[in-house]
Amino acid sequence: MSPERGARRSQVVMVEPALTQLAKLTASETHRLDRAIVAISVHPGLGTEVPDTLLRDYTDEIDGVRVIYYVTALRTITIVAYVEA
């Protein structure tokens, strides 16, 4: 019997606005944001739906980060549109 595997992570892609914002973050902010992005890649439904869009809005109050993203139809790619830390 093969060992059980953890949840399959989706590939994360950042679009230009998110990359621009990411470049302005400190190392500490980037580290906090990384944890949120890993969580989203494993569980894409974490964020709340933004009404009348395909976007989801995930806020981690403990780490103080916010990520706006959407997930492709097959849930294999998570596209990050905006980050805030």
Image: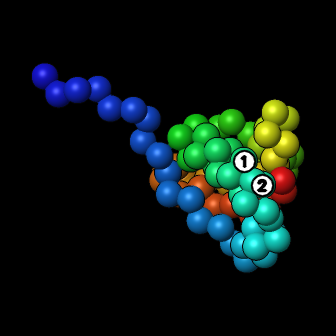
Q: x and y percent of residue 65 in the render?
A: 81, 47
On the image, numbered disc 2 is attached to which residue? Answer: 29
Say which mark, if any, is on residue 32: 1
Check disc 1 and give the amino acid type.
Arg
Q: x and y percent of residue 29 in the render?
A: 78, 54
How many labels were placed on the picture? Answer: 2
Of the pair 42 and 20, the residue shown nearer to us: 20
Q: Residue at x 83, y 53 (%)?
A: 85
Q: x and y percent of residue 76 in the render?
A: 48, 53
Q: Marks 2 and 1: CB-CB under 8 Å?
A: yes
Q: Residues within 10 Å of mark 1 (few under 14, many from 20)?
A: some
Q: Residue at x 32, y 32 (%)?
A: 5
Among the 4 quarters of the image, the one containing residue 15: bottom right
Of the pair 52 and 66, the residue shown nearer to us: 66
Q: Residue at x 56, y 59 (%)?
A: 12
Q: Identify the secondary structure beneath mark 1.
A: helix
Among the 4 quarters of the image, the one containing residue 7: top left
Check disc 2 and give the amino acid type.
Glu
